[in-house]
């Protein structure tokens, strides 16, 4: 069994954050889950909580997910960041890959979350 992890979910949709939170909680009830509704809020929360994983929506008002992920990657190169988005355009995928980001398509499902969390669960 691994030690509890801290996950930051970033999405301007409260419903999307709730769905992701529920799936993570089902799989790992002892993990800490924080939420942010914007890229700017994500940066502030990440600086105080130091997450083990960031799940980030791409399209948000203000600072978008890719810009926030770039900043997080600059500050914490080793923290895994995965984009959660319905935007499956090739350019978005290529950008995520170039930044070393994971990419999970919406709708979020328990299986997709389980696959994303598996490396953290093992380590």
Image (spheres, rainbow, N blue to C red):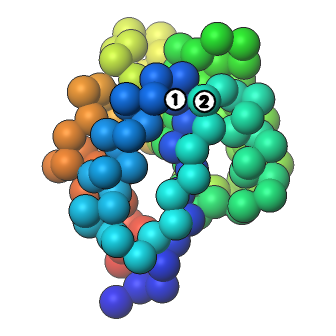
For disc 2, the neighbor class at 10 Å (few under 14, some 14 to 19, many from 20) is some
Evaluate whether residue 74 shows in this view: no
Count the numbered circles shown.
2
Residue at the spot x=37%, y=29% of the render?
Answer: 15
Q: Nearest the camera: 73 or 110? A: 110
Residue at the spot x=39%, y=49% of the render?
Answer: 21
Rendered location of residue 93, percent (x, y):
43, 22
Q: Are marks 2 and 1 in contact (CB under 8 Å)?
A: yes
Residue at the spot x=54%, y=23% of the render?
Answer: 12
Q: Quadrant of the C terminus?
A: bottom left
- Position of residue 7 in the picture relative to residue 44 (left or right): left
Evaluate whether residue 5 shows in this view: yes
Circle 2 sits in a helix, a strand or a loop, which is it? Answer: loop
Mark 2 / mark 1, whichever is N-terminal = 1
Where residue 35 sits, quadrant-wise, is top right
Q: Which residue is mark 2?
A: 37
Circle 1 sits in a helix, a strand or a loop, which is it? Answer: loop
Q: Quadrant of the N terminus?
A: bottom left
How far is the residue under mark 2 from the one under mark 1?
Answer: 5 Å
Rendered location of residue 50, percent (x, y):
72, 61
Q: Nearest the camera: 36 or 113? A: 36
Rendered location of residue 119, percent (x, y):
38, 66
Question: From the viewer's perspective, is residue 33 above or below residue 100?
Answer: below
- Position of residue 15 in the picture relative to residue 95 (left or right): left
Q: Which residue is mark 1?
A: 11
């Amino acid at each position: 069994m691994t030690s509890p992890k801290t996950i930051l979910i970033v999405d301007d949709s409260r419903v999307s954050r709730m769905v992701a939170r529920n799936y993570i909680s089902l799989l790992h009830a002892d993990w800490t889950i924080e939420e942010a509704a914007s890229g700017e809020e994500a940066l502030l929360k990440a600086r105080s909580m130091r997450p083990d994983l960031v799940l980030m929506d791409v399209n948000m008002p203000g600072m978008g997910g890719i810009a926030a992920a770039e900043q997080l990657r600059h500050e914490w190169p080793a923290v895994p960041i995965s984009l959660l988005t319905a935007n499956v355009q090739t350019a978005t995928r290529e950008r995520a890959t170039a930044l070393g980001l994971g990419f999970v398509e919406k709708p979020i499902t328990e299986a997709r979350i389980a696959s994303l969390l598996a490396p953290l669960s093992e380590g």
